[in-house]
Amino acid sequence: MANEFQKLLLAAYPNQDMLNFDPTDERQVEDAVREGSTGDTLFDFLWKELADHSGDEVEHVLKSLDQAARDIQAVREAVVAAFDAPRAPSA
């Protein structure tokens, strides 16, 4: 079953209604991630990243999430540079 970090993910993740599972059914969520059928690879990544942590690992989880955000930003900046795209994030 979901740990407390995964439950926070389920509560906080935007556009849950567009995911291919019922976010209130932890078994269904786990099955969808395992089968690769969530329809959202970022959600899959976050679910797996948070899977093996407990409440006493908040600092480690925050460092992992911060690193993932930096990695995404680095890729975004590369796309902007390569395609001379607007630098400001679109709303």
Image (cartoon, rainbow, N blue to C red):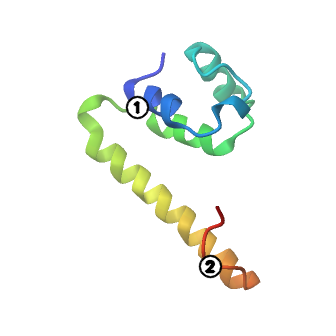
Q: Residue furthest front?
A: 91
* Amino acid type assigned to the residue bearing label 2 in the image: Arg
Q: Residue furthest left?
A: 56
Where is residue 34 drawn, in percent x and y? Answer: 65, 27
The image quadrant of residue 61 is top left
Say which mark, if any, is on residue 5. 1
Which of 48/18 is in front? 18
* Residue 77 appears in view: yes
State the residue at coordinates (64%, 77%). Answer: 78
Give left or right: position of 50 versus 53: right
The image quadrant of residue 66 is bottom left
Query: As displayed, is residue 68 above or below residue 54?
Result: below
Residue at disc 1, secondary structure: helix
State the residue at coordinates (76%, 82%). Answer: 83
State the residue at coordinates (64%, 16%). Answer: 28
Report the residue marked by disc 2.
Answer: 87
Q: Point out the image quarter for the C terminus.
A: bottom right
State the residue at coordinates (62%, 45%). Answer: 42
Say which mark, if any, is on residue 18. none
Residue at disc 2, secondary structure: loop
Residue contact between numbered discs 1 and 2, judged by CB atoms under 8 Å: no
Where is residue 20 drawn, in percent x and y? Answer: 74, 27
Give left or right: position of 76 versus 85: left
